[in-house]
Amino acid sequence: MASRPDFSCQKHLFDIPEDVTYLNSAYMSPILKAGAVAGQQAVAGKMRPWQITVPDFFDQPARACTLMGQMIGAGAEDVAVIPSVSYGIAIAVRNLSLAPGQKIIVLADQFPSNVYPWQEMAKSHQAEVVTIPRPQDGDWTTGLCAAIDRDTAIVACPQVHWTDGSRVDLVRVGEVCRERGAALVLDLTQSLGVMPFSVQEVDPDFMIVATYKWLLGPYSYGFVYVAPRHQKGVPLEEGWIARKGSEDFARLVDYQPEYLPGAGRFNMGERSNFMMTPIAIHGLESLNNWGVKAIAGYLSGLTDIIAERARGMGLKVADKCHRAPHLIGLNFAGGAPEGLTAALAERQIYVSVRGDSIRVSCHVYNDLQDVDKLFSALEGIL
């Protein structure tokens, strides 16, 4: 999709008061005002269930999968609707092979939903979870690729580390996984929608994402991309809506052994989700229309200024070549001062602390004025 070189701040589309500086999308993004209206209309629709028809069970989730496919360079048939990252990882665990003595590789301090399932899988298969240590220079890619060998069965990682925005070159990791025969499982919850990504370039076995952060969507809603080589696999559920012919409600008791084509068998039960799906659709439509590349370019400009001003205050940040365009950690030697986030929140400035860093995460509703407010406050507090 062509990017828009003239992309600018979209704060007017959100219900963010002028006195609020929200730099915390890595925690949770607000939804768009129009998305909220779509959700409210959907909730109101449940008051009159006689107006919910058979196509409503199918058309909107199909639209959501089409939009997700457009974002990642896949077909709608390669995408299924899921409720959470842990659900998507569980699908991957069920459908990947692991032999005794083999390795599963993760990153240090990786988000737990993409660690706990692999620990349990390794334990049950007499295999090993290998953790790549945090690199001092922010370059995860070199250490990760060096660790992938012929004994590696699975690599499970993000595109962006959730604590500080340090980046992984997934194209390179995908190449090494294919060379060494390892499966690649991605959790893109902290990057998809604001960083370009293509399954054609990376070729993951599974890609999982939740919508409540960068995709401007609701909580408890997400997607899994399943590579064609795994689309004959075993789903977590045996739901009616994942079977062929499920549109014919009158014949649902003519039990159908065949699944929907593609990734359809991996859809969660009640995937229609009448109330949340319209919100997810609106967020995806907006991001696709703006263009992820254009969004990344805009946010990179803000993050570069944040990095420069942080260094001016003596804080450490990752080099530009190793950080994401939208998420950055401002590292304090010896740890972030106690009560810092509370002091900022009193000034209506919202960030997170992760480890020794302030995590600052910009989205399409942020601008230079937000950056100025953050650093004016930090200079007054520190």
Image: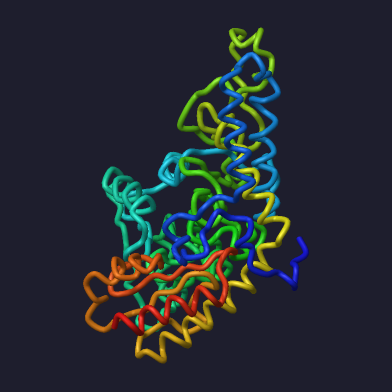
Residue 36 sits above or below residue 128 on the image: above
Residue placed at 39% from the left, 70% from the top? 359
Image location of residue 211, percent across then percent down: 53, 49
- Is there any visible trace of residue 38 in the rendered image? yes
Q: Is residue 276 left or right of residue 24?
A: right
Residue 349 sits above or below residue 155 on the image: below
- Could you say which quadrant of the image residue 328 lies in? bottom left
- Is residue 120 or residue 382 the one in the foreground? 382
- Is residue 109 or residue 280 the one in the foreground? 280
Image location of residue 329, percent across then percent down: 40, 75
- Could you say which quadrant of the image residue 174 lies in? bottom right
Image location of residue 201, percent across then percent down: 65, 63
Residue placed at 64% from the left, 35% from the top? 61
Residue placed at 37% from the left, 67% from the top? 163
Residue 264 sits above or below residue 198 on the image: above
- Is residue 363 or residue 271 the one in the foreground? 363
Image location of residue 111, percent across then percent down: 36, 57
Q: Is residue 205 left or right of residue 28?
A: right
- Is there any visible trace of residue 183 in the rendered image? no
The quarter of the rendered structure image containing the C terminus is: bottom left
Q: Is residue 173 left or right of residue 261?
A: left
Q: Is residue 288 left or right of residue 317?
A: right
- Is residue 204 or residue 287 the one in the foreground? 287
Residue at the extreme right: 2
